[in-house]
Image (cartoon, rainbow, N blue to C red):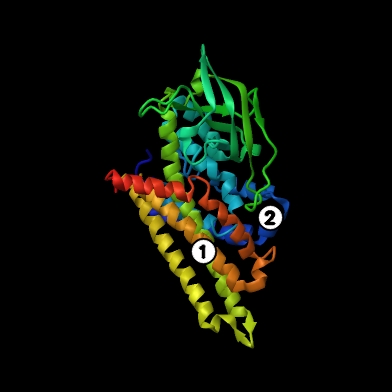
């Protein structure tokens, strides 16, 4: 696992400041363009790559910035201030896909891929979810069968983030039936141009325009034995659970960023909109809604920072990630709903930021483990004495 930070507090503050400025001055003004075109403009992608955002959580020895999770979440709260599609573009490189390689890959696998992932030359995609296996990977049906010095993969994945632009799929497949604690799930590195890999049409989603997802089908896909992550069949399920636990804290931080934006939009609207000649922000019921928003934002931010610290030290990588994702993603849904309410009819109009936020944040309660799965993890851990 990633150890102590290799980036000093002063250096990180410079990085955070540059990202803050990039988000507020370059991305926020183009949110409507991103929403209407359902794409991140090429120049913004190039700027993000130049800033090192495709590899900020990849260790420095592999070409990344080497930020640990306590620093990652600070950036995530900045990314969350704008359209979530921007972060989605490089999120899998730093998060659930890239971390599988960082923490479980062989030296050869790291050498082959991590430098290009960190530079943004390769987009890595995390291929776990299936039509019959979502938040719980135990229901996985994609199969990998050993054939001499190769593995043959067959199966279908669904809702795979960045699939239409991916260069590398980190694919989870069952190599044998589950037995006791052995899940039988392994993970493979499959280049997108491998014969038998087919990416479906881009999904049409409720929100998060510009963040592309699609089905991916593997039909008799042959990869060499060296494609098995860690060179070990037992690695897959542990890699999935470890990456998802870390990712859940990151998603929670994004939720805090979105909630802060919704709050800021609400305060600005309440100060400027009038009813009966008075700013609506002078009405106590509107102030009460703003107070509930602020309370959620502050509680979420504190929880994210605490959980990230506990993850980095190893004190809690089981329960805190689920608690944090559950609270923050539910919280941002309530904050976004209040934002629309404060805006009144205006908040229901397209091109008004809180309307987009309302749609975008709904997904946060679903991916990387639904709220229901988080409750099961938390409750199960408590009953097993894992606090």
Q: Residue at x 39, y 52 (%)?
A: 323
In the image as oriented, which residue stretches furthest toward the left? 385
Secondary structure of the residue carrying tag 2 is: helix
Position of 15 relative to 314 (above/below)? below
Indicate the position of residue 18 as horizontal and vertical percent values. Answer: 53, 56
Callout 1 environment at 10 Å: few (<14), some (14 to 19), or many (20+)?
Answer: some
Indicate the position of residue 313 as horizontal and vertical percent values. Answer: 32, 46
Indicate the position of residue 336 as horizontal and vertical percent values. Answer: 55, 64
Position of 147 relative to 59 (above/below)? above
- Asked if marks 2 and 1 touch (Cβ < 8 Å), the reply is no
Horizontal side, residue 217 vs residue 333: left or right: right
26 or 87: nearer the viewer: 87
The residue where tag 2 is placed is 35
Indicate the position of residue 110 as horizontal and vertical percent values. Answer: 47, 30
Task: Identify the image quadrant of residue 355.
Answer: bottom right
Horizontal side, residue 156 vs residue 259: left or right: right
Q: Residue at x 46, y 57 (%)?
A: 328
Callout 2 environment at 10 Å: few (<14), some (14 to 19), or many (20+)?
Answer: many
2 or 1: tag closer to the N-terminus: 2
The residue where tag 1 is placed is 334
Nearer mark to the viewer, of 2 and 1: 1
Secondary structure of the residue carrying tag 1 is: helix
Q: CA distance from mark 2 to mark 1?
A: 22 Å
In the image as oriented, which residue stretches furthest toward the right? 37
Q: Is residue 239 visible?
A: yes
């Amino acid at each position: 696992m990633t150890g102590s930070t290799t980036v000093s507090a002063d250096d990180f503050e410079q990085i955070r400041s540059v990202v803050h400025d990039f988000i507020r001055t370059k991305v926020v003004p183009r949110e409507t363009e991103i929403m209407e075109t359902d794409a991140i403009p090429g120049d913004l992608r190039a700027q993000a790559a130049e800033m090192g955002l495709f590899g900020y959580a990849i260790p420095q020895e592999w070409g990344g910035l080497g930020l640990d999770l306590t620093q990652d979440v600070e950036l995530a709260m900045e990314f969350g201030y704008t359209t979530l599609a921007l972060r989605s573009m490089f999120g899998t490189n730093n998060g659930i896909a890239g971390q599988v390689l960082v923490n479980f890959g062989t030296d050869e696998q790291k050498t082959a891929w991590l430098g290009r992932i960190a530079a943004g030359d390769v987009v890595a995609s995390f291929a776990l979810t299936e039509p019959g296996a979502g938040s719980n990977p135990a229901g996985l049906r994609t199969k990998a069968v050993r054939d001499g010095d190769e593995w043959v993969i067959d199966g279908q994945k669904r809702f795979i983030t960045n699939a239409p632009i991916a260069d590398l799929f980190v694919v989870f497949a069952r190599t044998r039936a589950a037995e006791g604690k052995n899940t039988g799930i392994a993970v493979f590195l499959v280049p997108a141009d491998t014969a038998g890999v087919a990416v479906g049409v881009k999904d049409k989603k409720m929100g998060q325009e510009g963040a592309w997802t699609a089905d991916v089908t593997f039909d008799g896909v042959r990869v060499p034995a060296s494609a098995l992550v860690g060179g070990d069949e037992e690695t897959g399920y542990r890699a999935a659970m470890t990456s998802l636990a870390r990712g859940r804290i990151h998603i929670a931080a994004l939720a805090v960023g979105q909630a802060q934006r919704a709050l800021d939009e609400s305060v600005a609207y309440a100060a400027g909109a009038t009813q009966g000649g008075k700013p609506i922000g002078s009405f106590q019921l509107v102030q009460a809604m703003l107070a509930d928003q602020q309370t959620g934002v502050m509680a979420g931010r504190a929880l994210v920072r605490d959980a990230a610290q506990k993850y980095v030290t190893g004190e809690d990588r089981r329960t805190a990630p689920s608690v944090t994702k559950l609270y923050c993603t539910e919280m941002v849904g309530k904050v976004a709903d209040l934002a629309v309410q404060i805006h009144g009819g205006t908040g229901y109009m397209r091109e008004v930021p809180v309307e987009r936020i309302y749609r975008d944040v709904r997904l946060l309660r679903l991916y990387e483990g639904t709220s229901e799965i988080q409750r099961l993890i938390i409750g199960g851990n408590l009953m097993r004495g894992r606090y």
